[in-house]
Image (spheres, rainbow, N blue to C red):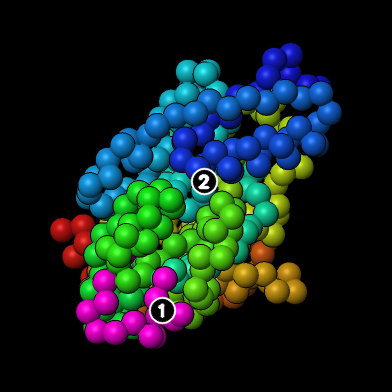
Amino acid sequence: MLPDRPLVIATRESALALWQAHYIRDRLMAQHAGLQVELLGMTTQGDRILDVTLNKIGGKGLFVKELEQALQDGRADLAVHSLKDVPMILPEGFALAAVGEREDPRDAFVSNRYRQLSELPPDAVVGTSSLRRESQLRARYPHLDIRPLRGNVNTRLRKLDEGQYAATILAAAGLKRLGFADRIAAVLEPEQSLPAAGQGALGIEIRADRKDLETLLAPLHHPETAACVRAEREVSRQLGGSCQVPLGAYAVMRDGALFLRGFVASPDGKNFLQAEASGSANDPEALGRQLAGALREQGADAILATLSG
């Protein structure tokens, strides 16, 4: 049964967030004839503070708090997020009702002068706001000059075009969704740059008591993507994953089984731990806990203690 009023989607007002919200709106309206869906655009604290790296101002949760407040007070029915921006533990009273089919989960190398990371000369300036990307770059290419680069996709590309950076690393999914696939000089395979937990997937958040929305959202849920990102997010949850922790986790499904890779590192990339695990797709969180345990056996707790101290 359709609601007797339009559904309202809370969304950030960046170009990528709006693309994602429109995409979910169009999918919902295609699945449910007669359903009306409206957008509530919002500017979050994470969008307002651009001169400080996320790990110093509270992490990616700053991108979702205002949207959750709109759900809480009834101004919106659901919120659409890039799943990699969603904290590993949701506040009480909220739930991820659906996970959309994943776009390309990989990182992308973007440069106007170079075709590959390996072509960058010593001291070439690479911009990124991600400790995960920074630690992997420093581990594999210690001769590069890694500098902070905040802002939405358009802002980062503009700063690159102005010559402030020789290159940047961005999520391939965001570039493709915004029509910037031609800006990708090279897609980085997971062996080069392991993605963030949930990268490339969209998460739809609701209030936990809104059971009426679960049936409406069910056609948008992609079980295979959900199983993969549940395993990835559990790795991050077990290790306290946030913008303060250089950590990556990436799972794929093959023949009904999940294959999961993960790493945790010091920001300078000098202490870099990685592990792999495989197991049943019926219990993704168990696989995530297994991989987190393997990283702990290698000494992950010592890295985490340094970061939190």
Residue 262 visible in the displayed image: no
Whole-percent x, y for residue 92 in the image: 45, 33
Q: Residue furthest top?
A: 4
Q: Which mark is residue 16?
A: 2
Kindly identify the residue that appears in the image at 29 percent across and 50 percent down.
54
Q: Residues within 10 Å of mark 2 (few under 14, many from 20)?
A: some
Query: How far across and how far down the image is residue 280, in percent?
Result: 66, 68
Q: Which residues are magenta?
A: 112-129
Q: Is residue 44 visible?
A: yes
Residue beneath the point at 27% across and 63% down:
164
Q: Which residue is situated farthest in the front direction here?
A: 162
Instruction: Give amino acid for label 1.
Output: Tyr
Q: Is residue 222 magenta?
A: no
Question: What residue would you read off at disc 1?
Answer: 114
- In the foreground, 303 or 41: 41
Specify few, some or many for label 1: CA neighbours under 10 Å numbering under 14, 14-19, or 20 or more. Answer: some
In the figure, 80 relative to 305: above or below? above
**Residue furthest out toward the left:** 309
Question: In what element is the residue under mark 2?
Answer: helix
> Which secondary structure lies at badge 1?
loop
Identity of the residue drawn at 81% across and 23% down: 34
Magenta residues, dominant SS class: loop
232 versus 36 height, above or below: below
**Where's residue 103, x and y in %?**
62, 59
Q: Nearer the viewer, residue 158 or 199?
A: 158
- Residue 98: percent from the left, percent from the top? 64, 43
The amino acid sitting under disc 2 is Leu
